[in-house]
Image (cartoon, helix red, strand yellow):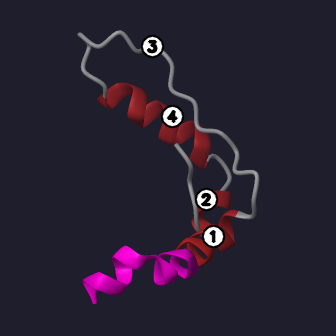
Amino acid sequence: MQLIGGAASIYGLIPAVEERVLHAIPSHEAIDTVEVLQSRTNPAFVSWKGGAILGILDISREAW
């Protein structure tokens, strides 16, 4: 799971997301660990970059 946007750098957000996701998984699933990794890029700009890429894809041109 990757958190993006300026809110992704809020102190304590990663452990809180890991805990909530782990508790949301049904008990019959064989998952016992959830790990949110730190983004390798600045999380404040990832959504902007994704939006710029989306704008040049053929599928998005056809959707308009």
Q: Is residue 55 magenta?
A: yes
Rendered image: mark on residue 18:
4
Q: CA distance from mark 2 to mark 4?
A: 13 Å
What is the distance, in whole Å, between disc 1 and disc 2 at their CAs? 5 Å
The tag earlier along the polypeptide, 2 or 4, is 2
* Quadrant for the C terminus in the image: bottom left
Left/right of residue 25 with respect to residue 46 in the rendered view? left
Q: Sequence-wise, which precedes: disc 4 or disc 1?
A: 1
Task: Give the residues in magenta.
Answer: 51-64
Amino acid, disc 4: Glu
Q: Residues within 10 Å of mark 2 (few under 14, many from 20)?
A: some
Inter-mark Cα distance, 2 to 3: 24 Å
User: Which residue: 49% across, 41% down?
Assistant: 17
Which is more N-terminal, label 3 or label 4? 4
- Image height check: is 35 above or below 14? above
- Packing grade of label 3 (10 A; few <14, some 14-19, many >=20) is few
The label on residue 42 is: none
Q: Which residue is mark 1?
A: 6
Task: Please check the rendered image and state whether residue 24 is part of the magenta-colored stretch, yes or no.
Answer: no
Residue drawn at (70%, 45%) of the image: 38
Q: Which residue is mark 3?
A: 32
Kind of residue indicated by mark 3: Asp
Q: Which residue is mark 2?
A: 8
